[in-house]
Image (cartoon, rainbow, N blue to C red):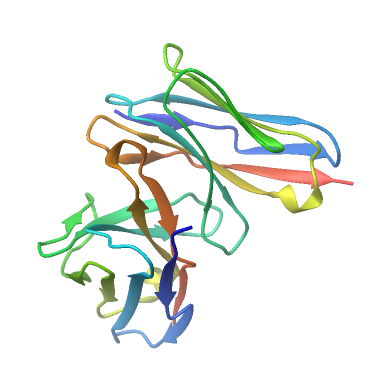
Amino acid sequence: GQNIDQPTEMTATEGAIVQINCTYQTSGFNGLFWYQQHAGEAPTFLSYNVLDGLEEKGRFSSFLSRSKGYSYLLLKELQMKDSASYLCAVTDSNYQLIWGAGTKLIIKP
Amino acid sequence: GAVVSQHPSRVICKSGTSVKIECRSLDFQATTMFWYRQFPKQSLMLMATSNEGSKATYEQGVEKDKFLINHASLTLSTLTVTSAHPEDSSFYICSAPWGDRESSEQYFGPGTRLTVT
């Protein structure tokens, strides 16, 4: 079957750095997405990785290793507004999006 | 960036009635749209793929006669929850891919909070 694993919940301190991991086992691979979702709102796009390596975009970076079926989202200089759920999603060989259950990130002052 | 709208944002209906939710792509055409349901503290669950000009594709376990999907134009898909029951109360979100197939970023509508009393 197809499966995406993320930690259920993480806690970090304002101003610090946090890494959210995502591992996947899917039928083929055509890209990995990270989305941010605040409570009661729809997800918003953060990043897309299809090749191995690190993609940096401001305070957020996303890393991919296809051979390991592994990605992480790195958030730097954490702000209180970063408290949200972070969803990892993989596009499989049929271009179907497979969603992880999301990681709830709690930022403490 | 691309914008997807949903209407209504919130709806309360009585058990047994039907509710229609609209999803529109405002500045791009979408031959495909996706409908998700999200229960509290859970991830998105894909319900169906809406295809312009043809029948929707439903995920396993989703009743196609209960959740009617119509994709009549390249910018509009509708989801009708028929004979709604309290267990249908959920957050319904639509999305549309924008860009080429290989890097189809999903643009999400703001969601519709359905409460069935």
Task: In the rendered view, tell whether residue B26 sits above or below residue A63.
Answer: below
Q: Nearer the viewer, residue A51 or A67?
A: A51
Quadrant of the frame with the N terminus of chain A: top left
In the rendered structure, the answer to whether residue B86 lies left or right of residue B66 reads: right
> Residue A11 lies in what quarter of the image?
top right
Where residue A43 sits: x, y (%)? Answer: 52, 54
> Residue A29 lies in what quarter of the image?
top left
In the rendered structure, the answer to whether residue A3 lies left or right of residue A33 reads: left
Task: In the rendered view, tell whether residue B33 sits above or below residue B7.
Answer: above
Where residue A76 sits: x, y (%)? Answer: 76, 34
> Residue B78 lies in what quarter of the image?
bottom left
Where residue B43 sits: x, y (%)? Answer: 48, 49
Residue at the image position 45 percent from the left and 85 percent from the top: B12
Where residue B64 sits: x, y (%)? Answer: 17, 64
Task: In the rendered view, tell whether residue A105 sits above or below residue A62.
Answer: below
Residue at the image position 35 percent from the left and 52 percent from the top: B98
